[in-house]
Image (cartoon, rainbow, N blue to C red):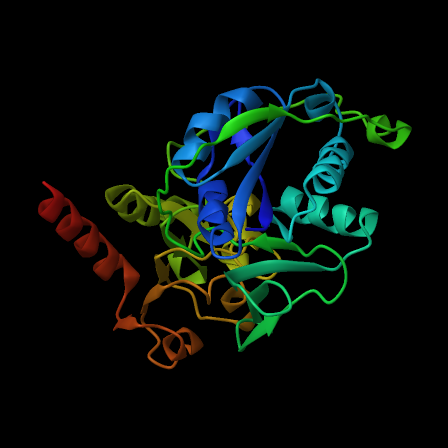
Amino acid sequence: MAEVLVYVDHVDGAVRKPTLELLTLARRIGEPVAVALGNGAGDTAAALAEHGAVKVLTHEAAEYADYLVVPKVEALQAAVEAVSPVAVLIPSSAEGKEIAARLALRIKSGVITDAVDLEAGDEGPVATQSVFAASFTTKSRISRGTPVITVKPNSVAVEAAPAAGAAEALTVSFSEQATGTKVTSRTPRESTGRPDLTEAAIVVSGGRGVNGAENFSIIEALADSLGAAVGASRAAVDAGWYPHSNQVGQTGKAVSPQLYIANGISGAIQHRAGMQTSKTIVAVNKDAEAPIFDLVDYGVVGDLFDVVPQLTEEVKSRKG
């Protein structure tokens, strides 16, 4: 069976969930071969093997941390030349999409970004995308070269499928371009204890209707009761009520959780573009004519300051 390269997103050997989702999708079109780079790459093999990787190509070098994405691109290029895969799958993060675009240029191939599904086709893998603010669903395939595809987090449920997962060293030679842009400093993001917004299974968001930074504590309380991430609309971010890093929408982050709860968000097309692929959508808004209600699975017409605290208490009572 043909092999599929899967780029491993990990932190010092701890594999992140989007990579496990990619392994699940990769098994639909071939045998997953994982590519783990940087510090702790060798420690990823066990988790990757548990989820279907038949082989794990590893390479540890200071360049992956000291410079921007080019060293990772060159390592993936080396992996493509060594394996001749039917496709390369990469998590659809900001960095992942840059890596994918650069790799596609290097190997003279096409690239598909933000896929939400993947299936085998007679002429190569077929990717499903949600486009034009999720107004249309398209199916696409790369017509030339090795397909490079980025996949949105939460697009598929993780499935365990134990495989050999034997670790093998990948031979990589860096060019001058790989060390052209050096990372001079890093500032760790302050942890909130909540899941990453783009990877969370549940997202609770607040918008203009929250009416102030101090009132986002209501949104946070509901999110914490559900073990969810907190999101915000552009209106709330522009007003300075919540950080831009939590913005959901066309100019923020695209999320695709199992459950999305929108509170005080009217549902402008820019916001919908970032969350319409959520599996189940719930909205709380006192305006019965708000556009968000055209999109939801469940809608509550009411004041969020009445509805959300009651919902939080109900969740807590059922969990407790």
Which residue is drawn at the image coordinates 40% and 55% (left, top)? 257
Which residue is drawn at the image coordinates 51% and 51% (left, top)? 26
For residue 188, say whether it is visible.
no
**In front of the other: 299 or 16:** 16
In the rendered structure, the answer to whether residue 149 lies left or right of residue 48 reads right
For residue 48, say whether it is visible.
yes
**In front of the other: 183 or 315:** 183
In the rendered structure, the answer to whether residue 276 lies left or right of residue 228 reads right
Quarter of the image where one finds residue 38: top right
Find the residue positioned furthest to the front: 1
Find the residue positioned furthest to the right: 176
Quarter of the image where one finds residue 280: bottom left
In what quadrant of the picture does the C terminus appear? top left
**In front of the other: 176 or 46:** 46
| Rendering coords of residue 122 (x, y %) | 59, 70
Quarter of the image where one finds residue 160: top left
| Rendering coords of residue 163 (x, y %) | 42, 36
Which residue is drawn at the image coordinates 58% and 58% (left, top)? 114
In the rendered structure, the answer to whether residue 52 lies left or right of residue 226 reads right
Total of numbered circles in the picture? 0
**In front of the other: 284 or 177:** 177
Establish if 15 lies above or below 257.
above
| Rendering coords of residue 173 (x, y %) | 81, 25
| Rendering coords of residue 130 (x, y %) | 54, 69
In the rendered structure, the answer to whether residue 295 lies left or right of residue 4 reads left
